[in-house]
Image (cartoon, rainbow, N blue to C red):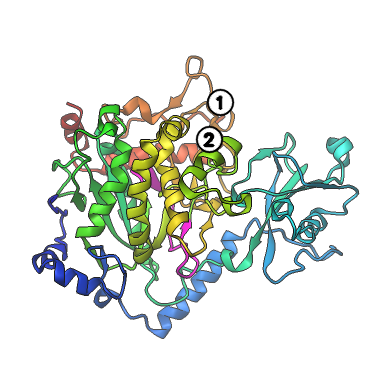
Amino acid sequence: MPSLRFGPRPSLALFFLAFGASYLLFCLYQYSSVPGLVRYDESKAQVQEVSLQTRRQEQGALIAREARETEYNVGAQESVQLQNSEELFCHLLEGKRISSFPVKEVWDTESGAACCAECQNFQNSEDPLKSCNGWSYCSQQEPCKGDYRKCELFHAHWPQVMNYQFSETHGVWTSGYLQNRGLEQPPAHQGGDRQYHTIVTTQGKASHWQIQIAFYWFKKRKAECEADPPCDMGGFTRILHSGKPDDLMETIPTFLAEPLPATHNANKDGYVVLNRPNSILQWLQQATIPEKYVLMAEPDHLLLKPLPNMMVGENPVAYGFLYMNAQETDIARIVRKFIGDVSDAELEKVAPIGNSPSMMTLADLNKVVPMWVDMSDKIYNDQEANKKWGWILEMYAFSIAYYKVGTWPIHTRREFMAQPPFPPWICHEGEFCPYHILHYTYRVTDAPEGMEGDPETSSWMFNKRDYSTTAPPKNGLPLPPANVTNSLIRNIIEMMNEATNNIEGWDEREARASL
């Protein structure tokens, strides 16, 4: 059994483990039907007073307004009502055109609001896959030319994650997707205890320095959050799946998990990511936390602002990935290997998500993770699936596991995370930037908007993979040049420099970790 180690604050897990399996089963009974899983300690959940509930509702209204900055604003002169249903409204994406084949084209449409109304009204009960859930509209005569006042209607697997292209002239094309208004309401401040626990899995030299920077920003954002309550940010646990303690055990709250057996093919192939579901299962089986909700994040995530509980009631929320689509012909065939020969409409329920970032109740996580472990192993050992999905196969495993055990809806939120430099993850100084998590997974250069330019000719570049065996220098990363106008690129460098400059013993610790 793997040892249980925590950082500066001892966990109650040791206490519960001492009482044995029978006591664990008793404690888990009202939260999960699966024995031996992480428990929500209700006694530690603070009872919210009426004044705090009011404060949450007020803050929720503010967050709702910010989250809907891009909702289509029908002006006073508009004759067409945007919303003809109490359930759906149009989520606006300015300056973008959906890159797909439309299910219908409507010409001489009066406005973007009218195009949205066309989409709402174009529903096909006989073939739901031909119903509209996204639209694009061209509004300016000269740049639009033959497409002027053209309304294109689309159906997408998950409309929040459709492939949008920036129009050459900003504002020429406007797009949007239909969203259930109930799912859009930020639920984090409805009163009561909504605190979540953050878990991050790590192993290896790169994640050693990344997790320190991530934890620095977690602590800073949590302090900001607590200074302006209510605050949903709870505890933090690094799940280290190397099986060996390291020099961060006393610095970052840590659970030590055992890696997969040395004989496992994933270890032979260097696919350490397969340890992620297995290590989270170990954490679930052995740890105790006071929070009812869990956020799964990664070492290369930076918090741009305090992160509220983004769930809708008790329904999970996740980030939708553009490169995951269970309806693509080749992918659909592989997905059906693991979920059965389901219809195309049923296939749409397989969400374009991995485990991170996502939020869900502890009870739901307890249901999903055992299936995730099983699916990860099956997909890894399936030659066709392994070859097709490669490094993201455990993401598909999580998505399929969620589908197989999930009876609840899940909401994907675009503002959950930004992955610059690619659109739509672009923000500019002085403008409202909706994103909460900054994921520095792609190379950024001095090309316009920080796009991935030619490394050989770029005068400035940052790529985390250049620091696979050693850490970035203390406060030493050069800032991007002025022509890089995407403020998220500058955020990456400035946040890294601030963290490394303030983390005690950065140079000494990273020198040891790099050996």
At x 36%, y 43%, the residue is 376
Asked if residue 315 is among those painted magenta in the image, a careful observer would answer yes
Farthest right residue?
108
Q: Quadrant of the C terminus?
A: top left
Q: Give the side of residue 370 with respect to residue 353, left or right.
A: left
Q: Which residue is more in the foreground, 3 or 501?
A: 3
Q: Which residue is more in the foreground, 429 or 330?
A: 330
In the image, what residue type sits under mark 2? Pro
Please, what secondary structure does the residue beneath circle 1 have? loop
Farthest front residue?
341
| Residue 382 point in image, percent of width and height | 40, 35
Q: Give the side of residue 432 with respect to residue 3, left or right.
A: right
**First in sequence: mark 1 or mark 2?**
2
Disc 2 crowd rating (10 Å Cα; few below 14, some 14-19, many 20+) is many
| Residue 235 point in image, percent of width and height | 28, 60
At x 88%, y 36%, the residue is 145
Which labelled disc corresponds to residue 421? 2
Q: Main secondary structure of the magenta part?
A: loop
Whether residue 309 is situated above or below residue 302 in the rendered picture: below
Residues rendered magenta in the picture:
297-317
Residue at mark 1 to residue at mark 2: CA–CA distance: 10 Å
Q: Quadrant of residue 425?
A: top right
- The reply to whether the C-beta atoms of the residues labelled 1 and 2 are less than 8 Å apart is yes
Asked if residue 318 is among those painted magenta in the image, a careful observer would answer no
Whether residue 428 is situated above or below residue 19 in the rendered picture: above
Farthest bottom residue?
50
The residue labelled by disc 1 is 447
* In this view, the mark in front (1 or 2): 2
Q: Give the side of residue 128 with respect to residue 434, left or right.
A: right
